[in-house]
Image (cartoon, grey):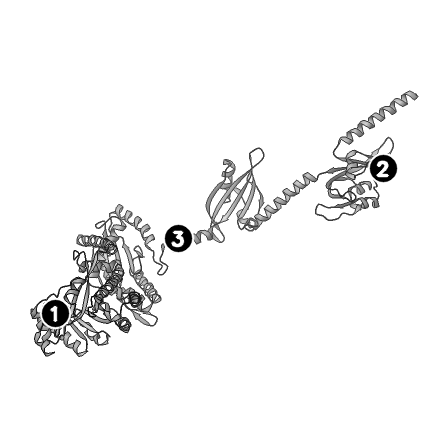
């Protein structure tokens, strides 16, 4: 009997040892607590958690627990002892995976602990014990918290998006919608099959690739433009697990882009299409006209004297004038006509469906009339005129560039024929245009390579033979190209400014050479084109040039045409006064061509007038020419102006103007234009000694 009891005790001892060994092998701490709060069992993990070497050292009293541990929630809020899992279990409560932050006051060790426990009754002995398991989940919980924190931050970031964000599972059931999406919940409710982003999401799931597409969607606020981006998310096995859909409302961006595009295609001043949009639309119009065998007319409108408006009244007045003219043109044209602002003072109109009811020349005449009507600007009236060049598709060209080139040639011809006119393109105009282009290119080269030269023709006092002035006349390659040809081309092409600068530099050099030869001062006169005269900085440029070259103003005279002066009399008077204020004499060249301008002569602060040579050359064959010549001489004398008779090519002509009281003459009979060196040799003493004029007058003097 005793032996049997001993064997049983030994078996129980072995059983306990094995059980304890199993418990010690666990990473999870296990405590068994009796009804008096004493720890009757504690595995090694529990001892380690509690930083003790034996269960006897564990004090689970309230004071002992508070002295040993600090316990708080994961958020850091302190937890009273009564709510600690160990205390609750000892009070008979069941605890399941209660997670808390724990700090050992003695060792300073901290960890996140998961606690589970309950009361256990052993029927054999009728004993009640509390069992508590303690598990260190610091690493996993920290990772979980980090993931949760990341998700929170990500959702917070998504909520800050103005774009709608929807996350769906692989069955396209929404699992998350950001704040913007929730505000636009109407797009997410109802049958998902009918949401406007559903097809993009489905394609992303099925193809396992990102999908980006543009969608127009009708909302309560009107039709909106969306960019839908659907991106699949994959699980560890590489299968699509979720899909993220971003719904970007691009309406404002698209509208802004369209506004920028429209601004780039339209003239900001008038709102008319510009030449870029003209090119785009013309391609379609010409292609359609070709298919339907229709004609299209191209009208190129150029405003005359518009630059004068800018120079005299300022750019703001010019802008107001352009806007008003653009309105008038729009009012006259049909809805299918294309009206564009082509340049500073040019408009281009394309007329489709040309027929007997809408003829290009009729339209051109109407537009010329409309443009010519006065425009009220800042309390005053401004008036400009227009010339129109017309080309026809397909007769004159099959591309816009060809048609514009032909219309430009026709417009130049209209200008040459007089203002307020229109011209159709012809082959003859084409030849002229080609010639003009060739001359322009060669002239550019000539200006850069020194192929231009000056010839000087004296203006002589008839009674004394004294050389009063030398007119500088520009030549190109010794007269190979006539000034009558290349000077107008220089004006049209904008080269006249460079040419005038070159002329000023050259006469400064020539005057310097003449002074070195001891020649008395002989002023040199230069011809200034209307284009150059109208430039706002014209006088300033002359003054600067004289200052830089140390050239006295008395050595320079300027000849202006009636066209330049009469275009805007008040402005011309202002400019001439400034030039005379510098000490420069002003001559009105080719006087008499614009006969109506005689009434303005008394107002102009000029020094001399030059009778147009056409009247002198024809004086013996035309009573009209003689009458005009006589009137000009008499008027100039009465106004105390110097009068110069140009075109003196015979003794008879010289005698005639002398008898009428003209005191100065210029022409081939007296001397042809000659180079500077020849001029110095002929007139070195300041007189026309080589020309016998009227010796009897010299004797009287």
Q: Which residue is mark 1?
A: 689
Foreground of the two, 649 or 287:
649
Foreground of the two, 101 or 323:
101
Q: Which residue is mark 2?
A: 56
Mark closest to the chain's N terminus, 2 or 1: 2
**SS at mark 3?**
helix
Q: Nearer the viewer, mark 2 or mark 3?
A: 2
Residue 354 visible from this viewpoint:
no
C-beta proximity under 8 Å, tags 2 and 3: no
**SS at mark 1?**
loop
Mark closest to the chain's N terminus, 1 or 3: 3
| Residue 450 to residue 516: above or below | above
Q: Which mark is residue 261?
A: 3
Within-10-Å neighbours for mark 3: few <14, some 14–19, many 20+: few
Mark closest to the chain's N terminus, 2 or 3: 2
Residue 468 coordinates in the image, percent (x, y): 18, 71
**Looking at this rendering, what residue extends furthest in the right direction?**
2
């Amino acid at each position: 009997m005793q032996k049997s009891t001993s064997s049983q005790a030994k078996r129980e001892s072995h059983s306990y040892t094995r059980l304890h060994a199993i418990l010690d092998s666990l990473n999870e701490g296990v405590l068994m607590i009796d009804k008096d709060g004493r720890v009757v069992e504690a595995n090694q993990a529990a001892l380690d958690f509690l930083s003790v070497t034996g269960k006897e050292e564990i004090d689970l009293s309230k004071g002992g627990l508070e002295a040993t541990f600090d316990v708080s929630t994961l958020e850091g809020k302190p937890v009273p002892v009564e709510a600690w899992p160990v205390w609750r279990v000892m009070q008979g409560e069941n605890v399941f995976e209660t997670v808390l932050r724990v700090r050992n006051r003695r060792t300073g060790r901290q960890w996140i602990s998961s606690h589970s426990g309950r009361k256990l009754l052993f029927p054999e002995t009728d004993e009640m014990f509390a069992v508590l398991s303690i598990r260190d989940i610091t690493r996993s919980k920290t990772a979980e918290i980090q993931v949760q924190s990341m998700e929170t931050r990500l959702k917070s970031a998504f909520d800050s998006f103005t774009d709608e964000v929807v996350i769906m599972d692989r069955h396209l059931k929404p699992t998350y919608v950001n704040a913007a999406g929730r505000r636009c919940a109407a797009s997410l409710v109802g049958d998902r099959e009918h949401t406007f982003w559903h097809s993009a999401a489905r394609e992303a799931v099925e193809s396992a690739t990102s999908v980006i597409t543009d969608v127009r969607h009708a909302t309560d606020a009107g039709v909106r433009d969306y960019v839908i981006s659907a991106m699949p998310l994959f699980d560890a096995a590489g299968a699509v697990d979720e899909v993220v859909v971003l719904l970007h409302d691009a309406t404002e961006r698209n509208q802004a882009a369209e506004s920028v595009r429209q601004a780039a295609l339209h003239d900001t001043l008038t709102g008319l299409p510009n030449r870029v949009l003209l090119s785009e639309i013309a391609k379609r119009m010409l292609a359609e006209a070709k298919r339907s065998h229709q004609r299209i007319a191209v009208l190129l409108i150029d405003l005359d004297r518009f630059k004068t408006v800018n120079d005299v009244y300022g750019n703001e007045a010019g802008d107001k004038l352009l806007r008003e003219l653009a309105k008038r043109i729009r009012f006259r044209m049909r809805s299918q006509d294309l009206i564009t602002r082509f340049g500073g003072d040019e408009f281009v109109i394309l007329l489709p469906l040309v027929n007997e009811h809408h003829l290009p020349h009729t339209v051109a005449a109407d537009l010329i009339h409309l443009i010519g009507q006065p425009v009220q600007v800042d309390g005053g009236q401004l008036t400009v005129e227009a010339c129109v060049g017309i080309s026809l598709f397909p007769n004159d060209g099959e591309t816009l560039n060809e048609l514009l080139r032909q219309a430009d040639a026709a417009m130049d011809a209209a200008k040459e024929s007089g203002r307020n006119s229109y011209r159709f393109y012809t082959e003859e105009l084409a030849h002229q245009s080609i010639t003009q282009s060739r001359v322009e290119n060669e002239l550019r080269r000539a200006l850069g390579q020194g192929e231009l030269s000056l010839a000087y023709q004296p203006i002589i006092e008839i009674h004394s033979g004294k050389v009063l002035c030398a007119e500088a006349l520009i030549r190109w390659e010794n007269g190979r190209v006539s000034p009558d040809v290349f000077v107008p081309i220089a004006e049209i092409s904008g080269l006249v400014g460079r040419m005038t600068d070159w002329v000023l530099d050259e006469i400064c050099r020539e005057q310097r050479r003449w002074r070195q030869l001891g020649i008395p001062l002989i002023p040199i006169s230069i011809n200034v084109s209307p284009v150059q005269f109208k430039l706002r900085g014209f006088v300033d440029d002359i003054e600067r040039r004289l200052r830089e070259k140390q050239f006295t103003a008395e050595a320079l005279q300027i000849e202006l045409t009636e066209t330049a002066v009469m275009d805007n009399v008040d402005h011309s008077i202002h400019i001439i006064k400034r030039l005379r204020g510098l000490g420069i004499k002003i001559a009105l060249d080719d006087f008499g061509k614009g006969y109506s301008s005689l009434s303005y002569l008394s107002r102009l602060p000029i020094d001399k007038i030059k009778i147009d040579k056409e009247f002198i050359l024809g004086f013996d064959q035309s009573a009209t020419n003689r009458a005009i010549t006589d009137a000009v001489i008499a008027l100039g004398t009465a106004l105390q102006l110097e009068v110069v008779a140009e075109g003196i090519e015979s003794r008879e002509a010289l005698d005639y103007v002398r008898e009428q009281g003209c005191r100065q003459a210029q022409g081939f009979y007296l001397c042809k234009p000659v180079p500077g060196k020849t001029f110095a040799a002929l007139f070195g003493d300041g007189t026309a000694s080589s020309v016998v004029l009227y010796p009897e007058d010299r004797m009287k003097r």
